[in-house]
Amino acid sequence: MSQAPPLDESERAKLEGRARKLAQEKAYLQLVNQLMARISALPGLENLLDNMLQSIVDIIGGTNVMLYYWVDGQLHYADVYGERRQPEAIDDAYVRQVLDTGTPLELEHDVADSQILNPALASAWTWIYPLRVGDEPVGVLKIDNLHVGTREMRQFLPNFFNYAAAVLKNDIFGHTQLKRAYDELKRLNASLAVARDAAEAASRAKSAFLANMSHELRTPLNAILGFAQLMVRENPLDQDGCRRLHAIEHSGQHLMELINDILELSRVEAGHLTLRVEPFDLRALAATVAEMVQLRAQAKGLAVECVCAADIPPRVEGDSHHLRQVLINLLNNAVKYTDRGDVRLSIGWDGRQALFEVTDTGQGISPDDLDKIFDPFYQTATGAAKGEGSGLGLAISRDYVRLMGGELAVESRVGQGSRFHFGLPLRTVEPAGEDTAISQKVLGLALDQPVWRVLVADDDESSRLCLVQLLEQAGFEAQQAANGEEAVDLFRIWHPHFIWLDRHMPVMDGLEALGRIRALPGGQKTPIVLLTATLFEDSPEAVAVPGSDGLLRKPFQAEQVFETMRQRLGLRYRYAEEPPAVAAATELGPDPAGVARLDGGLRLALRRAADVLDVEAARRIVEDIALQDPALARGLGQLLDNYRFDQIAALLDDGRPASG
């Protein structure tokens, strides 16, 4: 094998020089790649600035590296020592020159006078390089006091600077977008804070208004119901008088429930619904709600059925108040949207929960409306056409059922009727002996009882007088005070055995009077129960304060007053059964079929009396009707007692026999 001729010295030197140059170029390329990798190691504009400036010093050299750049048109300055500022303009003439021309600038410095001994460090340079993306200037980079190897690297650094410009532009764009989003979020948060503060202020104002309205509405209602109860308890009243007073009492109780429901809407809006768990009779509740819709149903010729399973416990524990509201709303809706047929309330029991169903043979609900009827303020086309309601009833009912641990559901077919149903977990409880005492009418104190002195302090004269007369009828000695100061003075000189104390009174309120009485001799032993006309159980006014022996909300029943005093004093009463005359007043309204069978002359005469609201003429006609149909006459008499001429007229119209 032939061998290559040996290289002469000049050729060998050329090859070695080329090899050294290639190795040097490779090293510079590796440095550039290393620079590119370091500046983009971490996301974010601030990380990019730190990495870029420090990497240039570490790899290229220089005593300081400075960067001028723009964010949203605002000039920024950064250097390797961590200085960050926003100058008004570029104060370096060479930097401005590079920016204007777009051409890099290299400035050589003579450092001979510095007495540097190393000849390699006898010169230094400043590089100023424009960072551009296409024709768009992004920034200007300035490197001070470069020494070793800068001339050789010059041909490789443009690649790095172009890459740095692209990365800088991208991070500035991301930073700008993030800052804009942050500023927008900050603005929105500020707007939301203002709206929240306004809403909270409005909520506080509404709560104060509702609290005042609750007191203003319930206080006179307490007097109305209280005097009605007093008159019912008086023996001289005849049967008609008892029936009329019972109608006043029943209507007053219904009005109180309406007031409670209207004011409680704010609790639904605020999400402050709470359970009112107490023992109650499920069958009696079902009968009551069915009776409440009976007259309206009969006016339309509808039958109302209430069916309770035989195995329903005699007494359960749950939220009877909200359950009653749900059933009344469902039954009222069923009657409203049913023109013929019947409405049925069914209650079953599966051993651990009660199962409720309200069915009707009415117009039904379209499939498109089924998914929306529980939305607040939503009304079907049929409901909107009737012009009744606000679209809140079903939404509130669903919230009530969920609060009690169930789920309200509906099934319906257009033209065939609807079925609303839900189950509620209710705990079976044994009837308490005290419940019977509360439900019975108190005739008075037992004959062997001592004289009990009771002080009533209330600034409302009607409420105060009503309670005093109730107590005196039962055999108590009673004194009254119009404010807390009078109550304290009477306690000093009269020493009552029991005190009813209204929370809100002029001169001195009930809470201050409570504290002063407790501080007097004998004041610690005297039972003191507060009175309040507030509605909401979770408000401060609805909670008995330390030092009191309880709280009773207005309007209250006479039996609640007597039972509270029985528990605190240990006294005994004489009880009586409910008079037959009062019980008769709760009978259901007149049967439309009976109205349809009436003599034509009686129907016409009664219709004329109803049109002109002539009570006496109507009563005479009802007396004549009693000769033919006593039950029908009693029902018509109930409507007359309540002055419901509109229902009498509707019965006479709807009950007209079909012609032919």
Image (cartoon, helix red, strand yellow):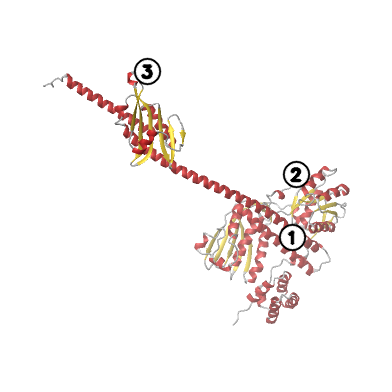
Mark 3 or mark 1: which is in front? 3
**Residue 487 spot, x, y in % from top left:** 83, 50
Seen from this angle, which residue lies furthest top?
117
Specify whether 114 is left or right of 270: left
**What residue does disc 2 label?**
546
Q: What is the C-alpha distance between the residues marked 3 and 1?
A: 107 Å
Q: What is the C-alpha distance between the residues marked 3 and 2?
A: 92 Å
**Residue 370 spot, x, y in % from top left:** 52, 61
Image quadrant containing the C terminus: bottom right
Residue 284 visible: no
Specify whether 66 is left or right of 590: left
The image quadrant that residue 285 belongs to is bottom right
* Residue appearing at x 80%, y 61% in the figure: 230
What is the three-letter code of the residue carrying label 1? Leu
**What residue does disc 1 label?**
221
**Residue 282 spot, x, y in % from top left:** 66, 57
